[in-house]
Amino acid sequence: MTSLTDQLRAIVGAPHVLTEGDLSAYEQDWRKRVHGKALAVVRPASTQEVAAVVRACAAAGTSLVPQGGNTGMVCGGVPDTSGRQVVLNLQRMKAVRGIDRDNMTMTVEAGCVLQAVQEAADAAGLFFPLSLAAEGSCTIGGNLATNAGGTQVVRYGNARELCLGLEVVNAQGETWDGLSGLRKDNTGYDLRDLFIGAEGTLGVITAATLKLYPKPAAALTAWAAIGSMADAVRLLEMAHLHLGAGLTGFEVMGQFALSLVTKHFPQQRVPFAAESPWGVLIENSDHESEAHARAQFEQLLEAAMEAGLVTDAVVAENIAQAHQLWHVRESIPLAQAQEGLNIKHDISVPISRIPAFCDETDALLRREIAGVRLVNFGHLGDGNLHYNVQAPEGGDAPKFLREQEARVNGIVHDQVAKFGGSISAEHGIGSLKVDKLPHYKSPVALSMMRAIKGALDPENVMNPGRVLHG
């Protein structure tokens, strides 16, 4: 009888079925939290090959772990330690199948790196707005499977809002072609939305039709120094009023988060680093002119200073300065990693309740764990904070993680629930939070989710143990 690995070699070619050597790029998650063991890493080059691989694995009773750039944060794209799962890595499927300028859409394969999608849109004189720190390595299939967010959600929405159609291989190895670029299609259940955010547990996304937009005439960036999270929320309200649809980014960064950037990347200049408890990064994209965008910014900042919300501010004079400001924001996770192992949270809370959430949760953590350091930053414009917890200075970070992670997670997640929020805003559930979801998701919601999983993947072939148990 032909072995499964031999069948896979016949489907995709022997060089693209990896079973030996250093496979850590596929078996270990980006944060190095888990290191699994795969039966094989399979790298198909087409949707037809993906379908054939799924059929072979389903017939053998072998589960699959779909994988893109392996940049996920919740251990959802790497195998378990059994040595019996097949990693289905889609990075060879990276073609831009076409751009429809009149329809303002682009169809790309799932392994296309996000930055390549952005560049292809730009070359066509158009704009694809999804932007993440990992855009040089994450793939569009992974972005859709986790419903990625990023820095421009306040204007353009999450990955879900940027997708008009999908091509998907289901758990039985059948291909659903839903790649129409229609903005209106009321012919039954929206199957596209079942697979977006499902983290590969219902099927394998192999291609997507994405929305494109006209390029802005100008995109300006400002950095403002503020005194409190409550002031940041008030500034956000003013930004909506002054900038309207031009408000494309609104990021908040705590002083300790910024101090880590200064400490570990001293070559970077952090504006007003020692002068204010919080920094806010605002982006204004204008379709009229740079002069108009700058005038809007000046009016906003002047009004905010008069209201006592902003103590100081700077508007980038050119693209290079704007990139420097954004680079500071994007360096916070890297600086935090340099500081040592930490406990990460990707949470969302109604924007109006964020100041009270931060005040109360900060106080609880500091009371319960002496010396704990809070790295709070994120996408205030859409209510998403990366509310991370660092070990006390000079402490044993690995020991802190082992001994305090469950306790810290319990405090933070209970507080999120109290304030009407979500324990996962843009990173997903994966395997890291699968045990926590039942505590914070309603039984009715979980029952419906299990029913969908059971209907589409009754043999539990697709990414088992992620999102839902089983």
Image: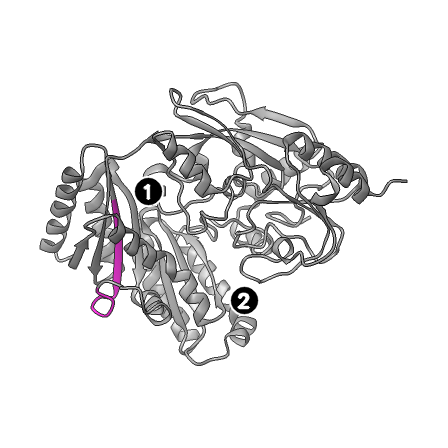
Can you see residue 372?
Answer: yes
- Nearest to the observer: residue 17 or residue 360: 17
Q: Nearer the viewer, mark 2 or mark 1?
A: 1
Can you see residue 455?
Answer: no
Q: Which residue sits at x=34%, y=61%?
A: 358
**Pointer 2 local density, CA inside 10 Å: few below 14, some 14–19, many at least 20:** few
Amino acid type indicated by mark 1: Val
Residue 154's mark?
1
**Image vertical order of residue 265 relative to residue 51, above or below:** below
Q: What kind of element bears circle 1?
A: helix
**Image vertical order of residue 147 relative to residue 420, above or below:** above
Q: Which residue sits at x=41%, y=30%?
A: 211
- Nearest to the observer: residue 316 or residue 240: 316
User: How far apart in space, not on screen, are marks 2 and 1 (Cα)?
Assistant: 32 Å
Question: Can you tell which quarter of the image residue 361 is in?
Answer: bottom left
Residue 398, x across and y down, in percent: 54, 74
Colour option used: one colour
Residue that numbered label 2 is attached to? 406
- Is residue 279 rendered magenta in the image? yes
* 177 with respect to 347 (left or right): right
Question: Can you tell which quarter of the image residue 203 is in?
Answer: top right
Q: What kind of element bears circle 2?
A: helix
Q: Residue furthest right?
A: 1
Residue 399, x across and y down, in percent: 54, 76
* 235 with respect to 115 (left or right): left
For the magenta stretch, what is the residue range? 272-283
Amino acid type indicated by mark 2: Ala
